Image (spheres, rainbow, N blue to C red):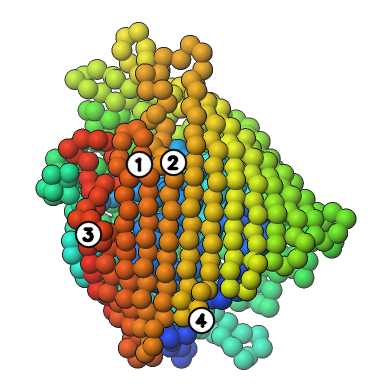
Amino acid sequence: MRAPVLWLAAFLLGGLALSGTPAQAQVVDPAELKNLSIEELTQLDVTSVSRRSERLSQVAAAVTVITQEDLRRSGATSLAEALSLATSLHVARSTQGSWAISARGFNGTAADKMLVQIDGRSIYTPLFAGVFWDVQDVLLEDVDRIEVIRGPGATLWGANAVNGIINIITKPAADTQGGLVTAGAGTPLERSFGAVRYGGAFGEASDDTSAAGHYRVYGKGFDRGPLVFVSGRSAQDPMHMGQGGFRSDWHATGQDVLTLQGDAYSGQLGQALHSDTRLDGGNLLGRWSRSVSERSDLEVQVYWDRTHRDIPGQFEEHRDTWDVDLQDHLRLSEKNDLVFGGGFRSTADRVGNSASILFLPDRRTRNLFSLFAQDEIALLTDQLHLTVGSKLEHNDWTGLEVQPTIRFAWTPDDHRTLWAAVSRAVRTPSRLDEDIEFVVGGRVVLQGSPDFVSEKLIAYELGYRVQPDPRLSLDAAAFYNVYNDLRSQELQPDGRIVLANELDAETWGLELRANCQLLSWWRLQAGATWLEKHLRLDPGSTDPTGGQGEGNDPPSRFSLRSMIDLPHGVELDAWLRYVDRLPAPVVPAYLTLDLHLGWKVVRSLELALVGQNLLAPRHAEFGPATASREEIERGVYGKATWHF
């Protein structure tokens, strides 16, 4: 564990070295952290749909924005937990470190159809084409917003943005000036957690009236208790982790902004039958943005990401990823808004195999080249817009992949948008699809295939977004998805299971969301989703599962949040969630309630008491219907946050 600790120290010192001499720190006043009005929420700028800033109310896509105020008042302590705020996402905890998170179906602990990014850095792993959620951590107080796009985004973001995109965007360093200390403890899950962050300024801008740059450094950690089995016995999977990092933003000229940021982490996750899993890694990202003119801006981003995971008795993985991305935005005329660019990514891994789980070969390097372009065209009037584009990617797995999209948006006024889209996206093969071998008793029982091809989706979407009253906004989206060449498990004559692409599927559904300011001091947020899924094996398939292993999805979910501002700086928030029964394996439906009581004691001090999963002693959210399925207990914790 010595190396990760040295990394952490180096990252923190590096951030301080970049900062120069700190300027006067600015105190952040928690009393100013008020809910945005409904009007202001609809006018939020989002960047994930078109890789440029545009108003949420007018985008031609199904979008949910989780704001910093949503995060603060939710009581969530991790990124995975916070994503439950987007009702359109099915977020389920399987074990202490394992989550199933996806949109529009095909959810699982190895869900592989959502692209997830933190500040433009993809956290997708080519090992199984998904996300290791246990090591994805940020200081939630530093998150500006989380943009959740339901539906394909492959034209701009590439392969694996099939069912949606989750884009976590942290605040610029200038917005995190001064100091922050936060600490909390509770039982049984959130045993203890805390963080320290400090931000300052350096240099002078060209006009000599403001700082040329800003920085922040932070450190955080947590100790979480284990989940429990169906019997109530401990699952023996506690987790503790430490993480630190920095961000520095420098306005080199009036046109150029340079950003350098990085993180490093180290932790352990318990296992009932083996030694603890060891987790560590780090990343470093640099970004140069130039505003060429009022009609043009350019951005170049480079990052390096290293991860290490050692699961005794299963496997060990070391991975290094290098990524370069270039984007140019040109407003060609009043009727044409063009975004184009390209990128290169190289990822190399080294796997330590066990007797039962093997990746063969044990080392692989894969390269990805990409070009993309998307143009938004105003038709006839400024009320009707057509967006067309495509991404061309060449990878070492399947060669050239083409992922086009076409979108229409009709905005008769600032309060109504009707939109429709047709898109193509692919999910490229992972190491699991091609190279995995599971061995039982010296015999291979499941095996990947070098002939595995990309999974394909054609998606049809229709949406309507309206603000009929300054105190009310409504959002509806319907979709119909057609999938081909999904992963199947083909039974061979010798009893082996070989992974192949003999499964097709259709899904369709409806997503609704409402935001209502009932009174000046009382707001309600509601959301609901319905999903239907039909699986179909190709003729000649020998898959004994019928494709059920490719996701376990509830037919319906709903969420209701109440946020009340009481006198004397007191807040009372309630969050009610219902998740329908999962079909295979069966997980019973559940209804759960979280409560958050906050008190802004003075200008810079806030206290909170949070109760989680209050309606039952414990409940299951995911996993096999066996005695080893883990359940989440009712819990409570207290938290204090001090700004200085």
Position of residue 218 measured from the top left corner of the image (x, y, whole percent): 36, 72
| Mark 3 or 2, closer to the camera | 2
Which comes before the other along the chain, label 3 or label 1?
1
How far across and how far down the image is residue 406, in percent?
Answer: 72, 44
Along the line of sight, the residue nearer the viewer: 483 or 200? 483
Instruction: Give the position of the C terminus as an image quadrant.
Output: bottom left
Label 2: few (<14), some or many (≥20) within 10 Å?
Answer: some
Q: Of helix, strand and loop, which one carries label 3?
A: loop
Q: Is 392 positioned to the left or the right of 432 in the image?
A: right
Q: Which residue is mark 1?
A: 581
Q: How far is mark 3 from mark 1, CA to CA?
A: 20 Å
Q: Are marks 2 and 1 in contact (CB under 8 Å)?
A: yes
Q: Earlier in the sequence, mark 3 or mark 4?
A: 4
Q: Which residue is mark 3?
A: 634
Is 458 on the left or on the right of 77, as rendered?
A: right
- Element marked by disc 4: loop
Q: Earlier in the sequence, mark 2 or mark 1?
A: 2
Quickly name the residue at label 2.
Answer: 555
Cα distance between the residues tagged 4 and 2: 35 Å
Number of residues whose C-alpha sits closer than 10 Å to that of mark 4, classed few (under 14), some (14–19) or many (20 or more): few
- Label 3 crowding class (10 Å Cα cut-off): few <14, some 14-19, many 20+? many
Sooner in the amino-acid sequence: mark 3 or mark 2: 2
605, 614: nearer the viewer: 614
**Residues tagged 1 and 4 counted as in contact (Cβ below 8 A):** no
